Image (spheres, rainbow, N blue to C red):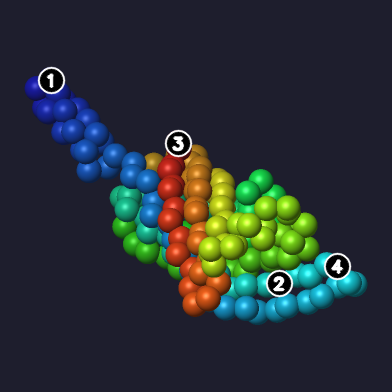
């Protein structure tokens, strides 16, 4: 009986400290213009390469399914970023290569666009939901979903981008 209590206390202590789920660190890095296309007279599309860095700080790996991230200027969706299914192993950093398909026509139709870039910076928001399965030691499996909200600032003069992301995981 004493041994069982010790095991329960040790497992509970580990579960509430070391194995407690931690939110992933996610950052977005544009890698360059891949394609620019003008369709008709008023629509233009632009494809920009993106590198998404996911740091899994947990002792469980996270196997995520295909998902899509939406990029917005104010409340208008101006791009979609497909995220291909993959695995973020425990306590590692994974880099996912993808492309953002920007709908320039939607951006230019926004009445706040020109005032929004008057300071030389284009501010965007990105949000994504990645459902998947967390696996600890290939024994325990839990359904989990990560939510990520990012603020992306493009400096129009230097063409540099800075992203700040807030991510959380729910089981």
Q: Of label 2 and label 3, which has the lower sequence position?
A: 2
The image shows a total of numbered marks equal to 4
- Which residue corresponds to mark 2? 46
Other residues around mark 2 within 10 Å, as few (<14) / some (14–19) / many (≥20): some
Label 4 neighbour load within 10 Å: few <14, some 14-19, many 20+: few
- Closest to the camera, between mark 2 and mark 4, is 4
Circle 2 — which element? strand
The quadrant of the picture occupied by the C terminus is top left
Would you say the residues marked 4 and 1 are in contact, meaning their CB atoms lie under 8 Å apart? no
Element under disc 4: loop
Q: In this view, does 60 lie to the left or right of 99?
A: left
Q: What element carries label 1?
A: loop
Q: Where is residue 134 in the image (x, y as percent from the top left)?
A: 43, 46
Residue at mark 1: 1
Closer to us: 58 or 111: 111
Q: Which residue lies at the image location 53% right of the left edge and 63% below the top edge?
A: 119
Assign a secondary structure to mark 3.
loop
Q: Which circle's residue, 1 or 2, is located before the other in the chain?
A: 1
| 3D distance between C-alphas at marks 3 and 1 | 32 Å
Q: Distance between the residues labelled 4 and 3?
A: 45 Å
- Residue 120, above or below 26: below
Q: In this view, does 43 lie above or below 17?
A: below
Residue lying at the far top of the rendered structure: 1
Q: Which mark's residue is nearer the viewer, 4 or 3?
A: 4
Residue at 64 percent across and 66 percent down: it is: 100
Quadrant holding the N terminus: top left
Left or right of 104: which side holds 50?
Answer: left
The spot of residue 67 in percent (x, y) is: 62, 53
Q: Mark 3 points at which residue?
A: 171
Q: Is residue 119 above or below residue 151?
A: below
The residue pinned by badge 4 equals: 42
Q: Is residue 45 left or right of residue 68?
A: right
């Amino acid at each position: 009986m004493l041994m069982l209590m010790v095991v329960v206390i040790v497992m509970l202590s580990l579960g509430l400290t070391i194995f407690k789920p931690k939110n992933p660190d996610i950052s977005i890095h544009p890698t360059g213009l891949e394609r620019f296309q003008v369709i008709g007279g008023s629509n233009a599309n632009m494809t920009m390469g993106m590198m998404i860095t996911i740091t899994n700080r947990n002792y469980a790996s996270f196997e995520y399914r295909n998902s899509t991230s939406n990029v917005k200027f104010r409340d208008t969706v101006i791009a979609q970023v497909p995220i291909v299914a993959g695995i973020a192993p425990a306590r590692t950093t994974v880099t996912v290569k993808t492309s953002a398909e920007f709908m320039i026509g939607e951006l230019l139709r926004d009445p706040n666009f020109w005032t929004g870039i008057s300071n030389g910076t284009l501010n965007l928001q990105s949000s994504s939901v990645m459902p998947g399965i967390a696996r600890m030691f290939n024994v325990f499996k839990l359904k989990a979903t990560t939510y990520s909200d990012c603020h992306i600032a493009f400096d129009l003069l230097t063409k540099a981008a800075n992203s700040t992301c807030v991510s959380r995981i729910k089981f």
